[in-house]
Amino acid sequence: MSSKCRGIGIDLGTTYSASVFYDGKVEIIANEEGNRKTSSYVAFTDGKCLVGDAAKNQVNLNPYNTVFNAERLIGHKFNDSIIQSDINNYPFKVVNKNGKPNIEVEYKKETKLFSPEEILSMILSKMQEIAQTYIGKKVSEVVIGVPAYFNYSQRQAINDAGVIAGLNVLRIINGSTLAGMAYGFHNIVSKEQNVLIFDLGGGTCNVSILIIEDGIYEVKSTAGDTHLGGEDFDNRMITYFVQEFKRKHNKDLSIDKRALRRLRTACESAKRTLSSSLQASIEIDSLSDGIDFYSKITRTCFEELCTDLFHKTLEPVAKALRDAKMDKSEIHQIVLVGGSTYIPQVQKLLQDFFHGKELNKSINPDDAVAYGAAIQAALSTGDRSANIEEVVLFDVTSFSFGIETSDGIMTPVIKRNTIIPVVQSHILTTYADNQTSILIKVYEGEHATAKNNYLLGQFELSDIPPAPCGAAQIEVRFCMDNRGTLFVSAIDKSSGKENEIIITNDQNNLSRDESEHMILDAKRFQTHNEISHEYNSLKQSFRSDNIDTAATINNEKLIDKIDTNQRKIIIENIEEIIEWTEINQDDN
């Protein structure tokens, strides 16, 4: 296998999946726990760092130093209202560092700060490790599936995380688009179909509409909500039980982070149970101050708690249809993707929205994005297998990109849902007599007023020949490649004077110095983990050898051949060694 696998696909979200394309088929790779999805948790202890399922499994014992939902923090300012709202639901500490959210933990008995990009890089490294173990060789080329409504800043942050992890990120593609590829690969689509992908995961709701025919995938529109998913449904149930606990015991669980973490784990389990049962139980011993908490919740109650959120998932569906200029009746298939689509009420609302049309469940909702990412990784690394050699993907921009013009207006140059790669131009002119320079401000967003959108970057075009107001003709050109990188240039058509900017990072992303520093830290971190793993393996082997030696010495056939006092001394020494390895099992 190793000679044929040159790239891996990764589905990024509240859980991660790694996948490869080999011998004409996709393999979703199980981790060391045997799970096809890996929890996006990172835990820090006095001696080591745990990533994935191992980190989540100990979260109730170590809630303050176990980080999750880092993908909800990336590409944001600390003071963003959405970040401030999320912080209230985290047991770990999120602090302000240079206007950006950072996570504060205790690691190796020291207080450490990690950026969201660093946390995500650790998880990406874990997924690379899982894939490499399966493949049998080092692979650094990856295609990453992200929520469709991630903005430019968030996508750049994901790319930064990949760079920190030592990965070569070939493409960052909308997860719902990749799921569409998975659907088309699973189902022979020889006749043109309009396919709507409804992707509701743990943290986001994403919708894409694609036209699929004979391996051609043309995205017509995308829409979504980056803060709407299973985690939000969990929060409603948690609030419900916090209120119940207060009524019964007159104690406020909201200030007990450890109790909240245990309650969250129980609510996550109850939510999954309610997808197949009409009632679920909550049973937590000694939840707070020694008080046991036992309760029940019905599916009807859960649906009532989340009524507004469930209805909100239909908003991206309606928006995607409007942007694609399609009627509901023109959609041939509605494909379910993401773990939260198992919720019966979500399915019912979606089916009712499409006047009872049957929902397509032909692909595994948990694997679809990773599946498509594996196909795209194979294509991007030159795989020409017969069943994918004619596959072509036309992806689109999720948002508009433009410039600030007169009176602070946002003038789109590349409109949202434009197929990429793309080159578009807009002509500017001067607004004053004898004006010799002009400031080009580049924005992302849909608001009519520029300042209400995301400022991605700015540059100045100078040495414009003096001329009356409005006489100069300045062509501003936007070029976006198929990796989603934006290049902006401006040229004065009379003089040929030109300037340009590559939008590689904005005020919300890492600087070059920060990125380089984090790459070095990540290498040291990885080296420490490798040494720690080897050390613990040797220690375990040493312990096993001593246990075997003790068993040999106590063997009936050897009792008469070893002096009693010598045997006693040896056994005592062995017992001391075994006791030492048990006491110091986490000591690195």
Image (cartoon, rainbow, N blue to C red):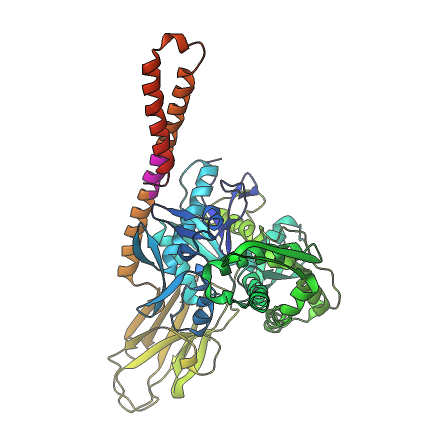
Q: Position of residue 207 (x, y in %)?
A: 59, 64
Q: Looking at this rendering, what residue extends furthest in the right direction?
A: 356
Report the magenta residues as a range.
Answer: 529-536
The image quadrant where one finds the C terminus is top left
Tell me residue 64's x, y (percent).
41, 57
Q: What residue is shown at x 35% (from left), y 89% (from top)?
A: 470
Residue 212 visible in the current orientation:
no
In front: 315, or 532? 532
- Residue 521 percent coordinates (x, y): 29, 51
Magenta stretch contains residue 558? no
Up/down of 408 relative to 542, above or below? below
Give the total number of marks visible in the rendering. Answer: 0
Q: Of residues 67 and 556, which is closer to you in this image?
A: 556
Relative image position of residue 400 (x, y in whole percent): 47, 73
Q: Residue at x 49, y 77 (%)?
A: 446
Instruction: Answer above or below: position of 575 versus 558.
Output: below
**Closest to the observer: 572 or 85?**
572
In this view, the residue farthest toward the top is 560
Farthest-out residue, left: 463
Q: Return the residue nearer the eye: 479 or 135.
A: 135
Classify residue 526 by image quadrant: top left
Can residue 172 be seen here? yes
Q: Is residue 17 left or right of residue 64?
A: right
Q: Is residue 535 magenta?
A: yes
Magenta stretch: helix, strand or loop mostly: helix
Q: Quadrant of residue 343?
A: bottom right
User: At 47% across and 80% down in the image, what residue appears?
Assistant: 447
